[in-house]
Image (cartoon, helix red, strand yellow):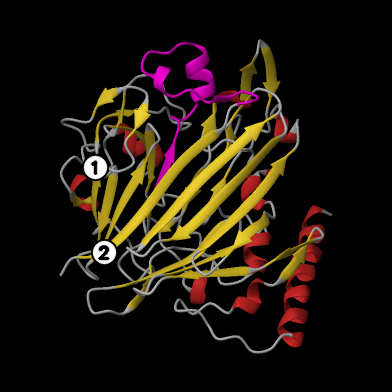
Amino acid sequence: MKTMKNVFLFAGIALTALIYCTESKATTPTKSGLNPIAFESTIKGKKTHLFILKNKRGMEVCLTNYGGRVVSLSVPDKNGKPTDVVLGYDNISQYADTARTPSDYGSSVGRYANRIKNATINVEGKTYKLRANDMVNCLHGGGNTGWLNKIYDVKSKNDSSVVFAITAKDGENGFPGTVKATATYTVKSNNTLDIVFQATTDKETVINMTNHSYFNLNGDPSKEGFNQVMYVNADKFTPSDRFYIPTGEIKDVAGTPMDFREATAIANKYDPSYDQIKNATGYDHNWCLNTFKNGKGDDNTVAASLYSPKTGIFMEVFTNEPGIQVYTGNFQGTGISCKHGIKYPKHVSVCFESQKYPDSPTKFAAKTKGWEISNPYLKPGEKYYSHLAYKFSVKK
């Protein structure tokens, strides 16, 4: 019955999209080749759309309010050719079919990004059991029933910016408090995608929002991306166990494959015999950013960067958060056809997820050394603010 239900759901979404295609006028494809009509649908009573942001320097970002997602991000390469540098699907049907094509591609993740051990938190002396969707742990706010698969409201929109809004009810996926949150995406004149997450709550809760775009700057996501040159501005990282939960240690990157303090091709550091890489079959770890000091993050200093010698595209990452999760597409290679029919291989991309450290609700509550800078709690009357920016340029 579950399988048939998913089939009917998928068929219903596809039919809705087809109706829009039939009734709407032809639409000019985006620079990344997307057809906006393929994102017009009604899911659970809410309409979905494709929103196109751009500037005068050739940058174009396409987003959908399904999960507050970045669907494509096109910037000029060293020859001036528009190049889509993020992974994803080219229709709303695949994003919405969480049974057959599940993904967090480009999503605005909440209420709590990354993992929480044993799907359990303690708030104001009370224990809350969350939705376990990653073995016994809670990942990205509960996975399929988290914010990444909710239809965000569109609070405002113009040619260069869109504000997505969401309200999460008290008890949703087990989390306490009704949270009202926004994700503001702005394309700036200097080819920066600027992202601001904000939230309030009526009851103390935990919150940790991020963007989950998968970057491949090579212009060909059909091939592995370990030739990309990566830099991470961090002296330390948080090792994880085989279930991707931080052990509580904070270790130096020096002398390990985790040391990207000098920009280098990922392949040059990758060592599958190193226990941390072996456990994750790649990089899927939190780095403790040097840009966070004295309880404050410096979002004017580069936290990380990625460069493609092939296209010349260079991306710098800025954030006010204490940590950044670097994930190298270790679960890619599923054989699923994605944008333009491409089947992404394993290690095709790199995610840079600004964040509180993984499992902060557990570690902060236990007063684990080093986790005191990663306070995940939000109280009534307080305002959550998280800033993340991806700035693009070209090296010739």
Residue extent of the magenta highlight: 352-381
Disc marking residue 271: 1
User: 95 above or below 238?
Assistant: below
Instruction: Kindly tell me whether residue 371 is visible in this rendering.
Output: no
Measured as percent of width and height from the top left, residue 223 is found at 34, 67
Mark 2 or 1: in front is: 2
Towards the viewer: 71 or 136? 71
Real-space Cα distance between discs 2 and 1? 30 Å
- Snapshot quadrant of residue 173: top right
The amino acid on which the numbered mark 2 sits, given as a three-letter code, is: Ser
User: 232 above or below 155?
Assistant: above
Residue drawn at 57 percent across, 55 percent down? 103
Residue drawn at 33 percent across, 62 percent down? 224
Q: Secondary structure at mark 1?
A: loop
Measured as percent of width and height from the top left, residue 236 is found at 27, 28
Q: Residue furthest right?
A: 1
The amino acid on which the numbered mark 1 sits, given as a three-letter code, is: Asp
Residue drawn at 68 percent across, 16 percent down? 127
Q: Is residue 389 magenta?
A: no
Towards the viewer: 31 or 271? 31
Towards the viewer: 329 or 181? 181
Residue drawn at 53 percent across, 83 percent down? 29
For label 2, the residue is 393
Q: Secondary structure at mark 2?
A: strand
Horizontal side of 208 relative to 317 (left or right) equals right
Q: Quadrant of the C terminus?
A: bottom left
Disc marking residue 332: none
